[in-house]
Amino acid sequence: MGISQASVAALGQLGRQHFTVRMPEPANHLFEVELQVREVQPQVPLRLRLPVWTPGSYLVREYARHLQEFQAEDEAGIPLPWRKTDKNTWQVQPRSPLVNIRYRVYAYELTVRTNHLDLTHGYFNGAALFLYVPGREGEPHTLTVIPAKPDWRIATSLRPCPLTDGEGTGRLGQSFLAENYDELVDSPVEVGLHRRETFEVEGIPHYFVVWGEGNLDLARAVADTQQIVTTAARFFGGLPYDRYWFIVHLSAGGFGGLEHKYSTTLNYSRLEFHQPEKYQRFLSLVAHEFFHTWNGKRLRPLALERFNYDQENYLECLWFCEGATSYYENILLLRAGLLSAADFLKILADQIKRLQQTPGRAVQSLSEASFDTWIKLYRPHENSLNSQVSYYLKGALVCWLLDLHIRHCSAGQGSLDTALQDLWQRFGKEEKGYSESQLREALQAAAGADLSQFFQDYVDGTVELDYDFYLQPFGLSLKTSFSHPNPSPYLGLNFNGESNRISSVDMGSPAQQVGIWAGDELVALDGFKVSAAQLPDRLRAYQPHQVICLSVFQAEQLKHFWIPLAPPRPDVYSLEVLPALTPQQQHLQQGWLGVVLGF
Ligand SMILES: [Zn+2]
């Protein structure tokens, strides 16, 4: 929960680490940062470090590559000697107890985990902007933000704090207090012209801030978000904070969200809100990041109990942190009345289709995907589909099957809900990290059954998910079919958009076996020019097992490949209600979906 009164009283003045962020020339995309470090020991080297990653996004992003013009001075403004000791560490030689650090940070990457500054706004993520003093991470940090223009407003979950530094800092900007460095880093700041709405749930204020132009219906988005918050509060038995900020960036085709303890930043394509499916996807994103308020931010694995900002923090349970959150993003919408049960089943079926079209599901397990996220998930390449599985996608499906299995094993008494609520009470509330085995024990306790085979096959192994086995007790089954009455034979080529350049080739597919690979450029089919967009339709003229001649440019050389076509692969997946449901099936379906379908 919030800051202790003791630390507020102790402050009222600058923290031992006080930052000032200015943006005097937003057109140059440079934030100017000043850090005052007080009570340092003269003559003892002072180390300052910039994180290499930000919690919630598991990739070493090397934020220091955007830091420039580092300077250090004493209180008289006389330069102090300094040197870099590694890629993200600066070492200053202080002469007196106060050290002033100045640097600029280039900010022109509009994502939820980086910094962005232009003529319309400034947005920063603490990990990508603020140096820390090793050993002082647990101390309060203060921050003054001076906007580029007088009419720019500041939106952040940081607690406002009138500072009395005797120099009137607050007169120019606005000052904030973070109880420690973690909170500073976990509280992104949006500065600029934006729309802002406020609503309350359980008497707690929530702010919904939108930067950027687009066709978002703000009133509707706010009302729906309020429903999501209310539903999540009911799920976990209350809200674990005293304020919460939704910061929404409307961008050109962007997508992403990052969870924080008192806020979230969401990036979404500005002109897609009028399409019902795209609006629903936006709400799923809102629900996903908000669910992390519990699962991921406060209820988190032991490996993340204390963040190490200087290197990778390895963990195996992202299949649960991200997978369960991805499953619950739509469960929340369903329970909030923002998604019908039929549409929910369509989303699940679509997720199954995406997983079944990922050859890498037979190569990498969920625990491996989690551990290796630092070098794999965020660094996709042409062979990723063949060698990797997403812990978001497969994690959501495994958590779904786990939910069904627990409900079935416990005759509807337990569920993934009860497991999460139990974990929240035992670990999340106190922010005690859980171990992988404590997580699995809690899931088994909810089922009242041994789940070791389930974990071995689906979390630690690559056994195909047996959907029908878990669906049958709920009166449902998985059906596959073709969207076209005359489906194209299977070749195994994948393209990005309209480009004729092959983006990836399925391992083991007919095209791969003859030697076609990613990067090759499609030219002709049986001697006639063909584009990527035309290829599926042109292939309909052929029967499986016929041999075609596909011509491609491979490293600028024209090459011809003779390929035996394979039978078409289903492209429609659906979850269908069995013809007659037993009372037990109806009971379980009602408990899971809130309705019984097909009646
Ligand atoms: Zn997430």
Image (cartoon, grey):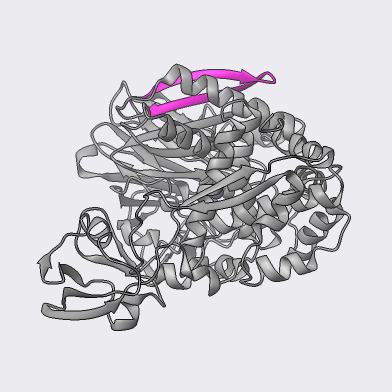
9, 551: nearer the viewer: 551
Is residue 166 at least partly visible in the picture? no
Which residue is located at x 54 percent, y 34 percent? 158
Camera-nearest residue between 310 and 268: 268
Q: Which residue lies at the image location 34% right of the left edge and 32% below the top edge?
A: 272
Q: Where residue 65 sits in the image (x, y, percent)?
A: 33, 62
Horizontal side of residue 458 vs 41, given as left or right: right
In this rendered view, identify the residue nearer to me: 216 or 43. Answer: 216
Locate residue 515, reporting x and y percent: 28, 82
Q: How many marks?
A: 0
Q: Which residue extends farthest bottom?
A: 514
- The answer to whether residue 72 is above or below residue 212 is below
- With respect to residue 317, does 101 lie above or below? above
Residue 29 relative to residue 318: left or right: left
Is residue 371 shown to the viewer in this render?
A: yes
Residue at (61, 67) in percent of width and height: 464
Q: Is residue 122 above or below residue 528?
A: above
Residue situated furthest right in the rendering: 448
Quadrant where the N terminus sits is top right
Give the percent coordinates (x, y) of residue 243: 61, 28
Q: What secondary structure predominates along the stretch shown in magenta?
A: strand
Of residues 386 and 189, the one drawn nearer to the viewer in this rendering: 386
Q: Is residue 323 magenta?
A: no
The residue depicted at 47 percent of the width and 64 percent of the height is 358
Place residue 524 in its image quadrant: bottom left
Q: Is residue 529 left or right of residue 102?
A: left
In the rendered image, residue 205 lying in the magenta stretch gets the answer yes
The quarter of the image holding the C terminus is: top right
Q: Residue 26, how many percent across, how many down?
A: 24, 38
Per the rendered image, the range of residues in magenta is 193-210
